[in-house]
Amino acid sequence: MQSNKNRLSGWAVFDLDGTLADTLTDISRALGSVLQKHGRPPLSLVETKSLIGKGPKTLMERAWIFTGQPASHDELLSLTKEYLLTYRFNPKGGARPFPGIQEGLRSLMRLGWRLGLCTNKDGHAARSLVEELGWGGWIKVVVSGEETVRKPDPRPLQLALRRMQAPSGRHLFVGDSEVDLQTARNACVEGVFLGHGYGEFGTMSLDGMRFFSNAVDMFSWMARSGPKGKNTPNPWVGPICRFAKPGWIS
């Protein structure tokens, strides 16, 4: 009989933008508004997508470099605040779940999974989006960029798992970027790269990680390999841990 220690624990943490939700239109609208106010040229959706990652401050820093003279430190802080305020007043309905996400989250909840978010996004915007998309009853824990240090530091992900009261076990972190993979690796949590989002592998390998091109296949694997699954999952051969032992939650 297959040992339960090889099964997924039933605790999963997700990134938000580019992983669960397609927020590119919202991000582009808010960024474009700020750029226009400061006499900067507008960016296309493709150009905006190339700048996303590591949170709103990095987005503004990259946008200013992309459109002209880089922002100073003080200017960058001010621009980031302006962007966040503009984003909050975006009209609702611009963001949408990626294909298969809504059904997949629902199926995991029926199987007793515990779900959380770990994002570099502003906390107010992240929690508002969770409610807007109808996930408030499913995702109880949201750790955002301003609460602690940012990904790829492992501590935001570890904080999310602590707040979820996750025991030791084979937990997952699902994301769409090199930053997310590095976060999982740093925290010694099994990483899953979901290929429908905004990010790329970058310079990282997938050693000890998993890749799915779409959410349907990923959720199917999670359901089969979880505590109530029917397949025989392979044991996780994870990376060498720099910060903690596999499954360790402080």
Image (spheres, rainbow, N blue to C red):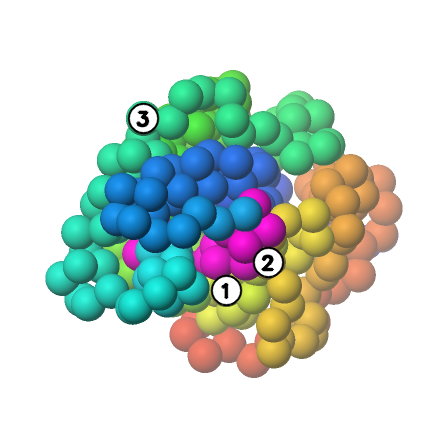
Q: Which of 213 and 156 lies nearest the eye of the viewer? A: 213
Q: Is residue 208 above or below residue 37?
A: below
Q: Earlier in the sequence, mark 1 or mark 3?
A: 3
Q: Which mark is residue 237?
A: none
Residue linked to disc 2: 199
Residue at the farthest left position: 74
Q: Position of residue 74 (x, y in %)?
A: 14, 62
| Marks 1 and 3 close (CB-CB < 8 Å) | no
Residue linked to disc 1: 179
Q: Secondary structure at mark 3?
A: loop
At label 2, counting other C-alpha atoms closer than 10 Å, the crowd grade (few under 14, some 14-19, many 20 or more) is many
Q: Earlier in the sequence, mark 1 or mark 2?
A: 1
Q: Main secondary structure of the magenta part?
A: helix
* Residue at mark 1 to residue at mark 3: CA–CA distance: 28 Å
Q: Is residue 245 above or below residue 27?
A: below
Q: Which of 115 and 93 lies nearest the eye of the viewer? A: 93
What is the tally of numbered marks visible in this picture? 3
Question: Quadrant of residue 29 in the image?
Answer: top left
Q: Which of 7 and 197 lies nearest the eye of the viewer? A: 197
Amino acid carrying mark 3 in the image: Phe
Amino acid carrying mark 1 in the image: Val
Can residue 56 be found in the magenta stretch? Answer: yes
Q: Position of residue 80 (x, y in %)?
A: 25, 50
